[in-house]
Image (spheres, rainbow, N blue to C red):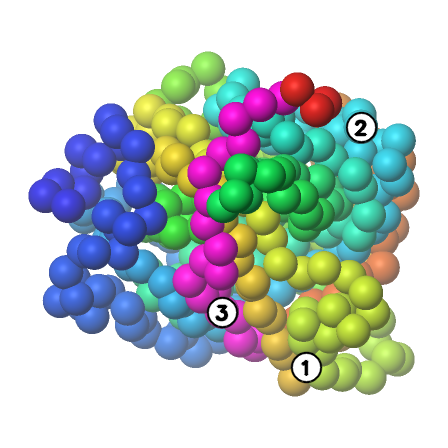
Amino acid sequence: MSSITTTTSTTVSRRDAASSSSTAHNATSSSVSLPSDRDIWPAAASMPDPDPIKVVPPPWTLNGDVYCISFWTSGAAARKLPQHAYSPLEAGTEFANPPGSHPVGGLSMIQIIRYRDSPVGPYDELLVVPGSFDWRRDGPDGRPEVGRNPRITRIYVSQKHTCYNGRVNWNCPKHLAKFDWDYGPNDSVSVKVYPHDTTDDITESKPSTVPFFQATFKPVSYVPSFPFATRWANYLGFETTLAMPPVPQGQGSHGELPSTDIWCKVIPLQYSRTTRAGWFDMSMRDDKGELIGEYENFWPGMGRWQLGVKMENADLSFDHATETWKPHKSRAHL
């Protein structure tokens, strides 16, 4: 790939990204491990960076704190996902309505992650998984094959390197956002997320002045910490393998919004020895009591107080896609 910053004018294949020189990969695949949450997360993580985008193929190993709220989406609710389930770019393309695919609900989640260490350095992330989606593809013998997997429909990150690579490597529909964190007493943590793609600027060059998401986590002091791994959910009958449709081309000011042309499956892994239960305050009202989102508590039907967990000092990994395939050609079965 001759020029990383000019690749956004064409579709990027996963193979092309993976073929970037090993020298560049080695130069970017390590980052400084930061000493503490409270002291080291500079606002500069969201500031424009003049460096060329670093192309880092999988596998990725990361470390950070994971805040997770799980909830259940009924089949009826899945058929009427709220408008903000997708970013504006993806909402207007087949990413939000791929041929042969539709939402079916099930176990859903919102995660906010503070990565201390990753192949592209520290960054923050917010992601929404509103349940599972049926999908259909053309099998090798021409017969249709079907499946059902969870899908990330909206995701924000605080720097361009992970935005670009997440789209190319795993079809994660990442966009830039500013993350504001506040650490309170008794280990409480608050975050506000200001997206770059909710303004009228199609280049997504700066954050909105209104948060798209806000929440406060307060750990339950009398509940001891415990180990937790996302793969354990498989033993309870919950699918954790993501199936992600191709992402569309954007006009990001940093060249951070490439498109892809094939589906992929990927298995994200998360593990923490120290997981703490706590309550999330999901209120979308500002300090004056004014509602700043479409829904009172971010998601339709969600109550203000949600029980969730914080996975402290978690180890995470994103490997190569386990499967890839071309988009299904017909909607005739829908």
* Dot 3 crowding, Cα within 10 Å, few <14, some 14–19, many 20+: some
Q: Earlier in the sequence, mark 1 or mark 3?
A: 1
Q: Nearer the viewer, residue 324 or 121?
A: 324
Magenta region includes residue 193: no
Indicate the amino acid at tag 1: Thr
Q: Which residue is mark 2?
A: 79
Quadrant of the snapshot with the N terminus: top left
Mark 2 is surrounded, within 10 Å at the Cα level, by few (under 14), some (14 to 19) or many (20 or more) other residues, namely: few
Task: Measure how far apart labels 3 and 2 are at the Cα level.
Answer: 31 Å
**Residue at left offset 65%, top offset 84%:** 273
* Residue at mark 3: 317
Q: Judging from the image, what secondary structure is the residue with disc 1 in?
A: strand
Q: Read off the magenta span.
A: 312-331
Residue 315, given in percent of the width and then of the height, sits at 53, 75
Front disc: 3 or 2: 2
Q: Is residue 182 above or below residue 59?
A: above
Q: Which mark is residue 183?
A: none
Q: Which residue is labeled 1 in the image? A: 274
The amino acid sitting under disc 2 is Arg
- In this view, the residue in front, 206 or 142, is 142
Question: On the rendered structure, is 81 left or right of 332?
Answer: right
Q: Residue at the location (33% across, 29% down)? A: 252
State the separation of the CA atoms marked 2 and 1: 37 Å
Task: Give the crowd class for mark 1: few <14, some 14-19, many >=20 residues within 10 Å.
Answer: some
Mark 2 and 1 residues: CB-CB less than 8 Å, in contact? no
125 vs 60, nearest the viewer = 60
Q: Quadrant of residue 3?
A: top left
Q: Where is residue 111 shown, x and y percent of the image?
A: 65, 54
